[in-house]
Image: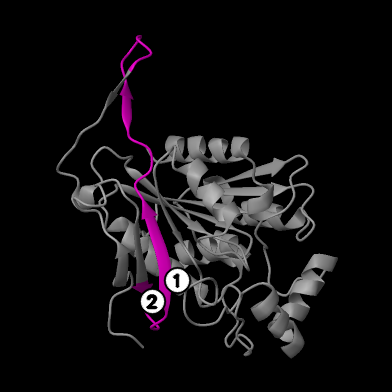
């Protein structure tokens, strides 16, 4: 167990100084509470503009007292939690970050066992510690509001994180997430269970998908996503799911939204498939607008 606080920056590879420019991204390794280095990227995002009433023109906000050189950026920072076998450098994750940057700063990171991060994937269990480190780091940049946006496995992690860390975030968006563990009702999920539970599958995961998967079963079994959704209130929760999702049928998002009660909102997207690859720019813009409306 590390004695460093969650979000501790173990190594920085890009720093905002006179040489790199004050709006340059910052890349660093964070240290989780159980000592895993997590590759993380902070991007300042779009400049905040205050629309002049009736003119259609805009003026740039220049609050030079904002901590960590976030002056002129949105008061919202998005922390993006990718799906299983993704990482911070994958094109689909970069596309998500680019779209959300129109609405605020963005933190992306690679879950344990993925990309340049250390450790092995526990497929949604210990990953809540990775997200906790990223959220704490994001909060330290001085933004007034932190919003987590998770996809598939990341969608379950943002739910559990918000339930286990009350007050850590200001809104949660869960896209294409399961409602319950051990679901094997679709062919893609049966293949995923083979990948995770079989030695040969884990070899395929390591060399075929560049994902290092832990060989131990969960002990204890973590809080389920649907149980977590019931504990998030009063933090607003948006559940997004495609009606063409090949992994999880529509009873999963409906269960999550029902558990969330009045603080939850459900979007069932016609023709949408699964997770980041299926989230088009129009949907991401709507998510950005939803966050803007719920956090101001």
Of 152 and 36, the residue lying toward us:
36
For this view, does 161 lie left or right of residue 30? Answer: right
Residue at point 49%, 35% (across, down): 289
Q: Which quadrant: the N terminus? A: bottom left
Whether tag 2 and tag 1 are in contact, CB under 8 A, the answer is yes
Q: Nearer the viewer, residue 76 or 85?
A: 85
Residue 267, horizontal then vertical, whole percent: 65, 42
Location of residue 107 in the rendering, given as x and y in whole percent from the top left corner = 41, 55
Q: Residue furthest left?
A: 65
Which span of residues is magenta-colored?
30-57
Rendered location of residue 134, percent (x, y):
39, 64
How many other residues sit within 10 Å of disc 1, few (<14), some (14-19) or many (≥20)? many
Could you say which disc has been placed on residue 32 in the image? 2
Question: Which comes before the other along the chain, label 2 or label 1?
Answer: 2
Seen at 36% across and 71% down, the residue is 29
Tell me how far mark 2 sits from mark 1, CA to CA: 6 Å
Task: Identify whether 230 is placed above or below 210.
Answer: above
């Amino acid at each position: 167990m590390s004695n460093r606080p969650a979000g501790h920056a173990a190594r920085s590879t890009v720093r905002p100084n006179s040489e790199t420019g004050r709006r340059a991204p910052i890349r660093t390794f964070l240290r989780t509470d159980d000592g895993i280095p997590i590759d993380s990227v902070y991007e300042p995002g779009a400049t905040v503009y205050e629309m002049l009433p009736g003119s259609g023109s805009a003026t740039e906000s220049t609050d030079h007292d904002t901590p960590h050189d976030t002056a002129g950026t949105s008061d919202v920072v998005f922390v993006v939690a990718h799906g299983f076998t993704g990482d911070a450098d994958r094109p689909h994750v970069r596309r998500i970050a680019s779209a959300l940057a129109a609405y605020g700063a963005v933190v992306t990171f690679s879950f344990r066992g993925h990309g340049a991060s250390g450790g092995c994937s526990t497929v949604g269990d210990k990953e809540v510690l990775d997200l906790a480190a990223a959220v704490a780091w994001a909060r330290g940049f001085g933004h007034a509001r932190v919003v987590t946006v998770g996809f598939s496995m990341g969608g379950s992690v943002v739910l559990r994180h918000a339930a286990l860390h009350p007050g850590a975030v200001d809104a949660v968006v869960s896209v294409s997430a399961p409602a319950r563990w051990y679901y094997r009702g679709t062919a893609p999920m049966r293949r995923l269970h083979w990948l995770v539970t079989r030695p040969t599958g884990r070899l395929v995961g390591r060399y075929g998908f560049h994902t290092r998967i832990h060989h131990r079963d969960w002990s204890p079994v973590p809080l389920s996503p649907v149980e977590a959704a019931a504990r998030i209130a009063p933090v607003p929760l948006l559940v997004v799911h495609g009606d063409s999702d090949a992994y999880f049928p529509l009873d999963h998002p409906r269960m999550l939204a029902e558990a969330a009660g009045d603080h939850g909102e459900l979007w069932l997207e016609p023709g949408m498939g699964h997770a980041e690859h299926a989230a088009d720019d129009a949907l991401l813009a709507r998510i950005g607008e939803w966050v803007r409306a719920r956090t101001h």
